[in-house]
Image: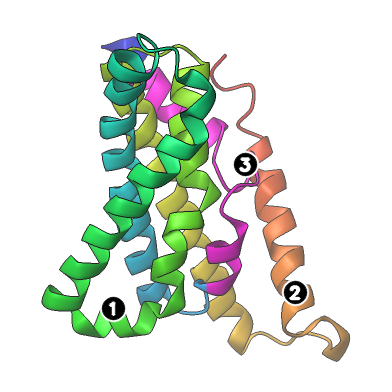
Amino acid sequence: MIDLLKLFIKSAVVDNVVFIQYLAICPFVGMTSDTSKATGMGIATSFVIILATAVTWPLYKFVMLPFGLEFLQTLFFILVIASLVQMVEFFLKKSIPSLYKSMGVYLALITTNCAVLGVTINCISKDYGYVESLVYALGSAAGFLLSMVVMAGVRERAKIAVIPKSFQGTPILYIAAGLLSLAFLGFKGLIK
């Protein structure tokens, strides 16, 4: 149990998919202008990360490995992720149309979100078991959501802050992202 908790904390904070692994930068930059949009995108992506890991791990272990198809790992995983994103898109369109509209093109881009693919491939490459893979995916999803909400908060604060003209807009966004990455790098020695 302690090892699973360590794995969760490590994947969420120590090896954060955005601030440490530099995955999912497109939604990180594009969807963090508003806290509610960032939260919605973070939850939708988190759901896809967890579900994709739950589907791709058995697919890899019980179908691809026995038939020698591991060289098609990326292709199969992308097909699974695209299918799951379509399911999430249909669900949001029917149940939360306002969030669906606010996410716009970024919802469809979850399919190409490298954090989703990266987490599923990391589970295989690190040779995690099924439960460990789910915990790793849950932690990575929580880390992605955390990074989205934290950056949205920083960007909302930057709207009312006095920022020199040359740093307004995109420059301050990247400076803030870099500083947040440095802050998360401070957790590197927390769990080995």
- The residue identified by callout 2 is 172
Tell me residue 166's x, y (percent): 88, 86
Residue 79 to residue 105: above or below: above
Q: Amino acid at mark 1?
A: Tyr
Mark seen at residue 66: none
Quadrant in the picture for residue 12? top left
Q: Is residue 10 magenta?
A: yes
What's the residue type where badge 3 is placed?
Answer: Phe
CB-based contact (under 8 Å), mark 1 and mark 3: no
Is residue 97 left or right of 8 when viewed as pictured?
Answer: left
* Residues rendered magenta in the picture: 5-30
Question: Visible in this render: residue 43?
Answer: no
Query: Which residue in the structure is indicated by mark 1?
Result: 100
Q: CA distance from mark 2 to mark 1?
A: 28 Å
Give the crowd class for mark 3: few <14, some 14-19, many >=20 residues within 10 Å.
Answer: some
Quick one: label 1, few (<14), some, or many (20+) residues within 10 Å? many
Earlier-in-chain disc, 2 versus 1:
1
Label 1 or label 3, whichever comes before in sequence order = 1
Which residue is more in the foreground, 177 or 70?
70
**Which label is found at residue 184?**
3
**64 above or below 51?**
above
